[in-house]
Image (cartoon, rainbow, N blue to C red):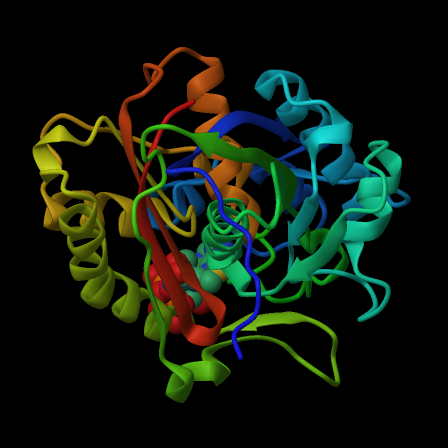
Amino acid sequence: MTLASTAGPAGTRILGLGHYRPGNVITNHDLIARGVDTDDEWIKSRVGITERRWADPDETIVDMAEQAGSKALAASGVAASEVDLVLVATCTMPTPVPSAAPALAHRLGIEAPGAYDVNSGCSGFVYALNTASAAVLTGQARNVLVVASERFSGWLDMADRSTCIILADAAGAAVVGPSDAIGLGPVVWGSDGEQAGTVTIDEDSRFFQQEGQAVYRWATGEMAPVALAACERAGVDPSEIAAFVPHQANLRIIDALARRIGLPNAIVARDIETSGNTSAATIPLALSRMVERGEIPSGAPVLLLGFGAGLAYAGQVVLAP
Ligand SMILES: CC(C)(COP(=O)(O)OP(=O)(O)OC[C@H]1O[C@@H](n2cnc3c(N)ncnc32)[C@H](O)[C@@H]1OP(=O)(O)O)[C@@H](O)C(=O)NCCC(=O)NCCS
């Protein structure tokens, strides 16, 4: 026998974006004042960060996700009653259960959607975006709310100057819905589990840890071909890309990747300068801020490239909302 199935639209696209950054601005000088053995010039030249945001002690991942998610819904024009699936990309929940997505949906007045979290570290948003797109394309959801929300300030070893200066808190969101044209290109994703131990939250210390140089070599060496393959599968020449929004881990990685991919007409996201590294949230946060500032025209092709813990990665060309 065969089973009945549902049918969906011809394509999907991002209908609206939103973001939220907590109010506490932590400059490099603030870190020094808190006793971190570092200096402003080292952080700016080696990582590219001038300041980052940390959440209030009682501000949660769901709180930040609610802010970003409600803005994305408003920007998309999609009502809460038209959302059938809510996905939260995060790797910094304080406990394994409950997941963030059902509580987020409840806060936003989305009644009984499918709801779950996606943990793929810094590439989590792009993974969730594709899960959302697949659900709409197969007719299993009319619209999907995808939110990446991270709260690293609860997982930092302030005695480890190679990590506590980098990680930060924020949320970014997108509403994915039906479209006559294809607005989300094919994803190019993969992972290298042999290097799983290079980015971790340590089981005993509960601190974020990474082998910075190993991840740096992997990102600068392996990710440009992934980005080029994503362009090829979407049928877009790199010269047509209007904006490049990679994971914001290190400005030197971002600049090296932009050079290697060859993106002569793209504006390159440099959100790390004022937001730090917020893992899964960096891509929707940077994209939402660029769209808000009017830097990316509606309908323009944007290259997303997530990479990090896993080690997992995902590249994809999308059209700006
Ligand atoms: C983490 C990272 C910024 C560290 O930069 P780096 O240039 O590799 O730095 P190193 O760890 O080799 O340290 C170089 C020197 O700077 C020092 N240093 C490290 N952190 C410092 C800080 N915050 N302030 C001042 N000096 C610092 C080190 O002690 C070392 O000093 P030494 O040469 O006297 O021993 C970089 O490796 C990186 O961005 N890696 C990729 C991270 C990534 O993509 N992660 C993805 C998952 S989020």
From the top left corner, tell me how far across and down residue 287 is, in percent: 44, 30
Residue at figure coordinates x 54%, y 48% from the top left? 132
Q: Most extreme residue toward the top, as rendered?
A: 294
Q: Is residue 274 visible?
A: yes
Q: Quadrant of the C terminus?
A: top left
In this view, 237 is above or below 207: above
- Is residue 255 left or right of 77 when viewed as pictured? left
Residue 24, visible in the rendered structure: no
User: Residue 168 at what x, y percent from top left?
Assistant: 62, 47
Residue 105: where, in percent of width, then height? 81, 41
Residue found 86% across the figure and 32% down from its top: 109
- Out of 16 and 23, give the one closest to the viewer: 16
Q: Is residue 230 left or right of residue 101?
A: left
Above or below — where is 298 with respect to 198?
above
Which of the two residues, 137 or 233, is positioned nearer the viewer here?
137
Indicate the quadrant where residue 317 lies.
top left
Residue at image position (19%, 32%) is 241
